[in-house]
Image: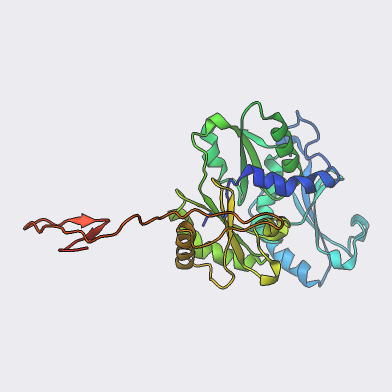
Amino acid sequence: MRNFRAISLNLVLRLLVGAACQDGDQTPLRAGSEVSAGEEDLKLVAYVKPSDEKSLSLEQEWTAARSSTTFPMEFINAFSESQRCPTFMPEEYPVIRLLRGEEVVVDYTGPRTSQEILRFINRASNSRQVPISLTKEEVDAFKDADEFTCIAHLDPSETALATTFSTVAEKYWTDFSFATTSSTAHSSVRGWPMIYILSPSPSTLSSLRSELHDFAKKHYASLTVVAADPTYFPDLPASLGLDLQDGYPAGAVHQLSTGKIYPYPNDRGFTPRELQSWGLDVWQGRVRPFTPPGQEPIQEKENVKIVTSHNLKVKKIPGLKIKIGGRQVRDEL
């Protein structure tokens, strides 16, 4: 399963814009709109504490990342070069900061792995803290640009939504890659179900993505699978009708065409077979959608109705096999 997804814009904005508006402004990533990336004095600095287990672990990942990029990176020992280090609480080490000259642009708070650090560097190298504008031909390529990409398909008249989307991008550019494209540049709007699978454990998410990769790829034409850390989306579990006391991993299906949400049973496993079996139950109307507190339950309409039933005689014809509903029939059904 691909780790990145261009997900529902309205859902992203509903979950993120509140936090983005509440926090203070970040230092601009670029010194000016006319300054190119090559002229920027950006540098990624790690402040570490000697003999600290987390710092030692970071050093290995840092070395691996530095060997794979030309982006300026510095690893500072918090004691031997203390005059160069800000004052941090002991439990805060190690601290990773993106600097422009001596000015702090932003603290990096993502996973301390070489792969994620390199992804952050790529965002810092290419981002202007605003969504990138894409042509129709560039949309598919951008989906591969990061682990998580968010593309807004906007009409030119949707200026308010574009402004809100830019606010979210400015806040979360350190974690995700954002872009916009004209809605006319995308021939169809996906209204298929979205399967959300949530877990705060990186190892669990990695395992789920590996196990469900082929499943998600096979069914991409009819549904979208998202595996995410709910830490980044604190309001998401409740909006999907999930009870955190039931533990993780947890999941739900959001039917975008109807707005209905179906929480995944906590006694089922997240395997392709289990997901398909439960999905069939949902489609056949055997599962009730989530009803938010204070609202009336949605009256479900059955997807399949049997109007009449009778035996069907099919005459045998030598050398001819007759199939009904994909099954080879004999004398009687």
Q: Nearer the viewer, residue 122 or 257?
A: 257
Looking at the picture, does residue 42 appear above or below residue 232?
A: above
Q: Position of residue 247 (x, y in %)?
A: 66, 71
How many numbered discs? 0
| Corner quadrant of residue 324 | bottom left
Position of the C terminus, as image quadrant, is bottom left
Q: Is residue 81 visible?
A: yes
- Spot occupied by residue 306 in the image (x, y as percentages of width and height): 36, 57
- In this view of the protein, which residue sits in the foreground, 307 or 228? 307
What x and y, as percent, mark residue 126? 68, 40
Q: Can residue 66 be spotted in the picture?
A: no
Q: Residue at x 65, y 60 (%)?
A: 241
Report x, y in % for residue 158.
67, 30
Please give the name of the residue rendered at 48% of the width and 67% of the height, measured from the top-left corner.
274
**Vertically, is 213 above or below 141?**
below
> What is the basis of the colouring in this image?
rainbow
Looking at this view, name the residue that lies furthest to the left: 318
Which one is in front, 227 or 131? Answer: 227
Q: Quadrant of residue 305?
A: bottom left
* Residue at image location 53% in from the left, 70% down from the top: 269
Q: Nearer the viewer, residue 192 or 47?
A: 192
Q: Image quadrant of residue 261?
A: bottom right
